[in-house]
Image: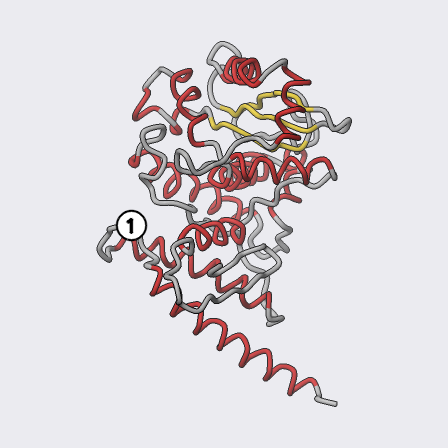
Amino acid sequence: MPGPVAHRRARGFLAIGVAAVVASRCLDLGFLLPGAAPSGKASSRRDMVTGGIAGALMAAVGVPQQANAYELPPLPYAYDALEPSIDKATMEFHHDKHHLTYVTNINKALEGKDQPPLVELQKTAIQSGPAFRNSGGGAYNHNFFWLEMAPKGKGGSPSAKLAKAIDEAFGSMDDFKAKFAAAGAPGARFGSGWVWLVVGKDNKLAITSTPNQDNPLMEGVEGTPGIPILGCDVWEHAYYLKYQFRRPDYIKAWWDVVNWNQVNAWYEDALGGKAPTADSSSAAAALVGSRAQPEAKGKPAFGLKFNFEAQFGS
């Protein structure tokens, strides 16, 4: 029977082989912004993607890893992919500056300590102090936000099950959108915050809003606690370049880029008591999936499926 040394060598060779194949696929699929020449920004974004994928690959083949800091996940689409609802410039500084700041600060707060999955950090964030509440919440909320959006026409629609639950809770989809927008309007959520659709302990849907970077997973949160399946960032930095003071216009346009396919999946998980992990691996997997859609006919398909449900090829 092979000993532990042989097992380690086998895992090492497997990791190297998988990484080499994935690297060739990434080059083939053009892991840059569509139509962009190699640049500092594109290179940085590519590094974030490959870094996230590398970690997932190593975990998948059983290679031991040291505890890692939380990472800024790559966007699962180009910066301009959500236009005209959300402009390119807003996406660039929202993701690359604001989100990065939250990730950096929560890493500083946990430096030298074990770092649990980001979703697990949310429960006690309020009691743990401002760094956990503001930066830990901000890191989780933004991971969630990027994944729940998709280019217009690509996000699908609510599943029959979710649509029925929305009708039962709010009367109709139009009534739901109106109540959601009202909860996020300046008169209801003064200043910065988020508006959410959550699944409560009774498995019923509810709309709530939270201040700053709080979210419904946090114990002691203002509003209705629950498992979030949809959330809209109503901080000014999320919309001010394009909409200025017109937050209701931003929320109205935002519906065009909701990724209902993701919301449907999160709804099913929430019914079973599972909150969205919304971690770096999920975002990297989503980006890989979006790049891997075009597949030349007759070209051998290459599929790898990891614990985060990423697939290369089809």
Nearer-the-camera pick, 245 or 221: 245
Q: Is residue 273 visible?
A: yes
Q: Position of residue 275 (x, y in %)?
A: 66, 40
Q: Please indicate whether residue 78 sits to the left or right of residue 4 in the image.
A: left
Nearer-the-camera pick, 195 or 77: 77
User: Going 42% across and 56% down the picture, which residue do you hit?
Assistant: 292
User: Going 49% across and 9% down the picture, which residue do you hit?
Assistant: 187
In the rendered view, tell whether residue 5 sits above or below residue 28: below
Residue pushed farthest bottom?
A: 1
Q: How many marks?
A: 1
Residue pushed farthest left?
A: 37
For the residue marked with disc 1, what is the amino acid?
Pro
Q: Is residue 124 visible?
A: no
Q: Position of residue 259 (x, y in %)?
A: 49, 36
Residue pushed farthest front?
A: 298
In the rendered view, tell whether residue 93 sits above or below residue 166: below
Residue pushed farthest right?
A: 202
Q: How is the image coloured?
A: secondary structure
Question: Which quarter of the image is occupied by the N terminus?
Answer: bottom right
Q: Where on the picture, by quarter, is residue 124?
A: top right
Q: Residues within 10 Å of mark 1 (few under 14, many from 20)?
A: few
Which residue in the structure is indicated by mark 1?
34
> Of helix, strand and loop, which one carries label 1?
loop
In the rendered view, tell whether residue 165 sits above or below residue 63: above
Q: Position of residue 3 (x, y in %)?
A: 71, 88
Q: Please indicate whether residue 42 sits to the left or right of residue 121 in the image.
A: left
Q: Position of residue 223 (x, y in %)?
A: 65, 20
